Image: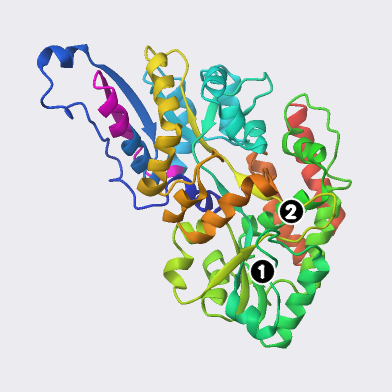
Amino acid sequence: MSKLSRRSFLKGAAAAVAAGAFSLRSERFGSINIIARAQQRTLTITTIPGNQATRMQLVADNFMAVNPDINVVLNVAGGAETEYKPTFPQIVASDDRPDVAWYWVDGRQYQDIANNGFLEPLNDLYESEGWNDVMPESTLTLYTQPDGNKYAVCGGVVWYPQIYYNKAIFAEVGIEAPPADRPYFTSNEELYDACNRLRAAGYEPLTIGGKEGWIVGHTHDAILSRVATNEQLVDLLFNWRPGSEPLTRYTEPPWTTANQLLLDYANNGVFAEGFLGRSYAEGRALFVQERAAMYQDGSWAPTAPILYNEAPNIDFGWMLYPQVDEANGAKFLLYAGDGIMVPAGTPNVDIAKQFVAFMNSPEQVIAQIGGAGIVPSRTDIPAEEITAIGPQVAEMYAMLPTLGTTTGWDDPVPANMAEQSHILWQDLLGGRIGVEEVGQSIEALAERHRTR
């Protein structure tokens, strides 16, 4: 499973809407008379197949029900999301651009789209709808461009990486899981001790599919967030931007500290034996077969639902990776790339913004939870509303404001930096390169982006 398909749990992994088809809703209100039809305005929306299309259609239906003078046409992109991603920049710049669009907000094509005037600023909606007060600070930071504007709003989130653990195995071995109000070990030594005891009892400790570099990247992202200050982490997320003067370089701490701790995890037997040779599904299989007591994955593992389907008889809990520094508690890494945006210069900018505001209202957000399995980006939704997706997800959602969130490093950085890091983690853990070489390679790529 590629990193892109990992994200598709949030952005379209549900059963695909008929590939290549467009869903046209212009004749929905058959009872409206001819004069009323002539007075309708048409709002066009573009999205990808799967639960994004399901969610958009749900909101479109609700929007038209309260705005009968507006007809919503939902265009579902044909083909795979890997085809939509590179073609959308041409779509948003064309005369045929939609009024509202779904797209990834990350360090790839979105940066050029937003920074070259192809999107409407949504700052006014952030103020009028109160989004600045109900979205995590990490999301607001990610969505704020260098010019200070926000050109999209986050429609839903996932978080990663969690450690899912088998409660029965923990009880058998005598390992006490972290408490619900502090869901992580307070040191790596506690994790190492638990792993040693599991091995002594005949179980593999933590299983991951290390053959796929993005999974190891998630582990590194978590460790980095434990050893970097917020100022350092934000700098590492964005100091690749052209013209940036980095405060922190990849050849020095905290980046090199995180590299060493990742290697320490492997050397201290945290990961299941042979983890570098296992794919995503193969890594999970050890947990499903109850050969491993712990499994690393994101919040999508229950919601897809993977674990609920594959391991229906396992009572599993969850925790975060350990705290490293007492002054820097464990946080959730939030993927907030589920972007809803308004292309610039269409005749319907006013109703497009009206739709985006409607879509992100509390009532419509709650409708999307049950109707499309979308976990809201806003943190003011009652946790009990999330239980439709799964109890563990509801527990974690309730903890987001308490523990805090940050953005995983490899989400906003350019594709070549993220992809190179995935290779480097595998080489590091496989003993082919050293800790310093990782930093040197990433710093060289970052410098190219800064000076382009």
Furthest residue in direction right, as rendered: 252
Left of 431 or right of it: where is 303? left
Callout 1, which amino acid? Answer: Leu
Left of 321 or right of it: where is 21? left
432 or 48: nearer the viewer: 48
Q: Does residue 421 belong to the magenta stretch?
A: no
Q: How many marks?
A: 2
Q: Marks 1 and 2, Cα distance to the nearest angstrom?
A: 26 Å
Question: Is the Cβ of the residue at disc 1 closer than 8 Å to that at disc 2?
Answer: no
Which image quadrant is residue 317 in? bottom right
Residue occupying the point 57% across, 19% down: 123
Instruction: Please report whichever mark, 1 or 2, sits nearer to the chain's N-terminal start.
Output: 1
Callout 2, which amino acid? Answer: Ala
Can see residue 396? yes
Q: Which residue is mark 2?
A: 330
Q: Position of residue 36 (x, y in %)?
A: 16, 14
Q: Residues within 10 Å of mark 1 (few under 14, many from 20)?
A: many
201 versus 42 height, above or below: below
**Quadrant the C terminus occupies:** top right
Q: Which residue is mark 1?
A: 276
Q: Position of residue 372 (x, y in %)?
A: 38, 47
Which image quadrant is residue 197 in? bottom right
Left of 394 or right of it: where is 440? right
Q: Residues within 10 Å of mark 2 (few under 14, many from 20)?
A: many
Residue occupying the point 67% across, 39% down: 413
Q: Position of residue 37 (x, y in %)?
A: 17, 16
Which image quadrant is residue 232 in? top right
Q: Which residues are magenta?
A: 60-81
Q: Which element carries disc 2, helix, strand or loop?
A: loop
